Image (cartoon, rainbow, N blue to C red):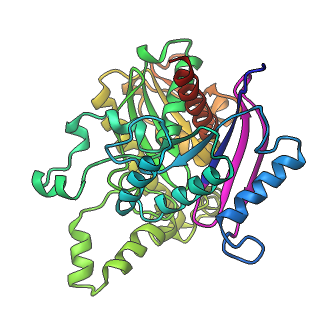
Amino acid sequence: MTRATRVLVLNSGSSSVKYQLIDMADGARLAAGLVERIGEGAVPDHAAALDSVAEALGAAGMGLDSPDLAAIGHRAVHGGTRFTAPTLITDEVVQAMRELIPLAPLHNPANITGIEVARKLRPDLPQVAVFDTAFHAAMPESAARYAIDTATADRWSVRRYGFHGTSHQYVSRRTAELLGKSPESVNVIVLHLGNGASASAVAGGVCVDTSMGLTPLEGLVMGTRSGDLDPAVLLHLHRVGGLSVDEIDDLLNRRSGLVGLCGDNDMREIDRRIAVGDQRARLAFDIYIHRLRKYVGAYYAVLGRVDAVVFTAGVGENAVSVRVAAMSGLEALGIELDRTLNAARSREPRLVSGAGSRVAVAVVPTDEELEIAGQTFGLIENAQER
């Protein structure tokens, strides 16, 4: 009997479901799609969305009842301290994810709904949760702990969890491959720059620090999120400005970052505005880069030795100006960018550092779906071998 090697990857959001069907025999993408506007009209709920996914796959001859389907891998945002590796989904796992909802109230409920619907569609099929926070669970306590009263922190699970973990894990490993080395021998600073943005310090394949914290709000300047700020700003806005907790939450998550600074969160538009002399766009860009460079310097100090700085995600992979500005003036750290290589467009992993650069500078397209599929398939294979 032919071994089943296909994995369906599901990313269930509050109003959408993204999916990819990947054959782990060769990494080929057999199907991909997006069901949007769940709760509106033709797609009233996640059950209807998953039915739509099943119908689309079936029409292509790759339905959910296919014997070639080995497992379903689910993106799950928050695993807390309990889930630090890909996890076979059971009723107990789903209940534990429910208990983590206060840590990710916008994401975990939708992830759980997608899982429950998929389990009803294929109750016989192994299903695996791959958590965004899992890769960062290896951080030492000195990096994960906030300097607040320990008993209070423990009672309310307040610590730094980090996010974008599947991307950081995939990209750091692919960067080692690009350098022709094993992940265990390489220290990498990963800059995942999209509308959400995070940095990580990866030593020998293990995350030792990351910029996002209890929530995805901490760290770098992002499209609509503030990133780092004095926590007393919140108290000031509440006590003096009269803003409610919900208003402050909305301000920091949806009306800050680049959009708060200049009205745009599309780096292409910001570049265009800078080119015609728009000073508001220039200041927003400079603040974005200043924060980014601070994290590169901090993680250089954390790692002690850096083999590569790697850019990934939408902005990291495509914004030439961001890479130039972020890496300029770092020659004393052994970092030199090749302007010609950096300006060249490619969808492949590539080096953009100068010939004399002691630290490689790379652009590595992220592939979170492939990483989820790989972790899912690996877990199922290992379980079967046992």
In the image, residue 315 lies at what x, y percent? 59, 48
Residue 2 vs residue 293: left or right? right
Decide: is 127 above or below 106: above
Q: Which residues are magenta?
A: 12-37
Residue 22 placed where, x, y %?
72, 35
Q: Quadrant of the N terminus?
A: top right
Q: Can residue 149 be seen from the camera position used here?
A: no
Quadrant of the rendered structure where residue 60 is? top right
Name the residue rendered at 27%, 85% in the picture: 241
Residue 260 location, x and y as percent?
47, 70
Query: Is 290 or 100 nearer to us in this picture?
Result: 100
Query: Does residue 301 appear in the picture of this structure?
Result: yes
Task: In this rendered view, identify the residue nearer to me: 306 or 277.
Answer: 306
Determine the main secondary structure of the stretch shown in magenta: strand
Which image quarter: residue 253?
bottom left
Q: Quadrant of residue 215?
A: bottom left
User: Up-down: is 298 above or below 265?
Assistant: above
> At 65% from the left edge and 28% from the top edge, which residue is drawn?
349
Percent x, y of residue 99: 35, 58
Q: Residue at x 57, y 63 (%)?
A: 265
Please name the residue shown 41% across and 44% down the image.
133
User: Does the magenta-highlighted stretch encompass residue 161?
Assistant: no
Residue lying furthest bottom: 242
Image label count: 0
Looking at the image, residue 281 lies above or below residue 165: below
